[in-house]
Image: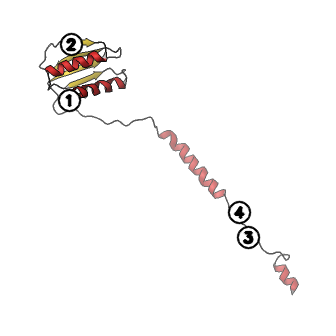
Amino acid sequence: MASSFSGSMRGGRSRKFKSEINVVPYIDVMLVLLVIFMVTAPMVDPSVINLPTAGKSAQPPSEYIQVSLKQDAAATVKIGGAKSGAAQSVTVASRAELIGTLRDLHATHPDMPVMVAADKEIKYDEVIQVLSEAKKIGISRVGLATR
C-alpha cells in the first residue's frame, strides 16, 4: 500500500505552490495605454489659447481719444469720432510724452473715453503698458480697437 500512496504523490515529492507574480497581463495593459497616449497626444495642442470673444458694444462712444501705436515706437494721439470733424493729431516719440499728452487731454476732456489702436505686429506688453498708464491717470473708460 505504501507504493500506491507514493505513486499518487508523483514519486514521493510534495506539491509546491507557485509564488511568482504573473506580469504578462500588466505588460499588456501598459502597452495598450501607451498606444492610446501615443494616438491622442498629437490631437491635443497645448500651445492653443482659447481667447474670449468680445461682441460690439451696444452704443459706441461718439467722441473718444484715439491712441495709435505703431511698431516703430511712435504713437499718434488724436481726438476722434463723429462730432470731432477734422481733429488735430499729435505724434509723440516716447511713452513719457504719450502719458503727458493723455494727461493733458484727460484734464481738458475728463469724460472722454480712450481707445487704443495698436498695430498687429507690436509687442503685447506695449499695449498693456499704455492701458495701465491710462487707468493710472484716472481715465475710467479705456478700450481696444478691433476690426
Instruction: Tell me: 3 left or right of 38.
Output: right
Indicate the position of residue 48 as horizontal and vertical percent values.
42, 35
Q: Residues within 10 Å of mark 1 (few under 14, many from 20)?
A: few
Q: How crowded is mark 4: few (under 14 residues within 10 Å), some or many (20 or more)?
A: few
Instruction: Tell me if residue 51 comes above or below residue 104 in the rendering.
Output: below
The Cα–Cα distance between marks 2 and 4, rounded to whole angstroms, is: 85 Å
Colour pattern: secondary structure
**Closer to us: 123 or 47:** 123
**Closer to us: 49 or 43:** 49
Label pair 2/4, CB-CB below 8 angstroms: no
The Cα–Cα distance between marks 1 and 4, rounded to whole angstroms, is: 73 Å
Q: Mark 3 points at which residue?
A: 17
The tally of labels here is: 4
Q: Mark 4 points at which residue?
A: 20
Mark in the foreground, 1 or 4 = 1
* Residue 132, picture quadrant: top left
Q: What element carries label 3?
A: loop
Q: Is residue 147 shown to the viewer in this render? A: no
Q: What residue type is labelled 4?
A: Glu
Q: Name the residue under label 1.
A: 141
Indicate the position of residue 60 as horizontal and vertical percent values.
17, 28
Who comes first in sequence, dot 2 or dot 3? 3
Q: Residues within 10 Å of mark 3 (few under 14, many from 20)?
A: few
Q: What element carries label 1?
A: loop
Who comes first in sequence, dot 1 or dot 4? 4
Q: Which amino acid does label 2 sit on?
A: Ser
Q: Which amino acid does label 1 sit on?
A: Arg
Q: Mark 2 points at which residue?
A: 89
Quadrant placement of the N terminus: bottom right
Indicate the position of residue 119 as horizontal and vertical percent values.
32, 20
The Cα–Cα distance between marks 2 and 3, rounded to whole angstroms, is: 93 Å
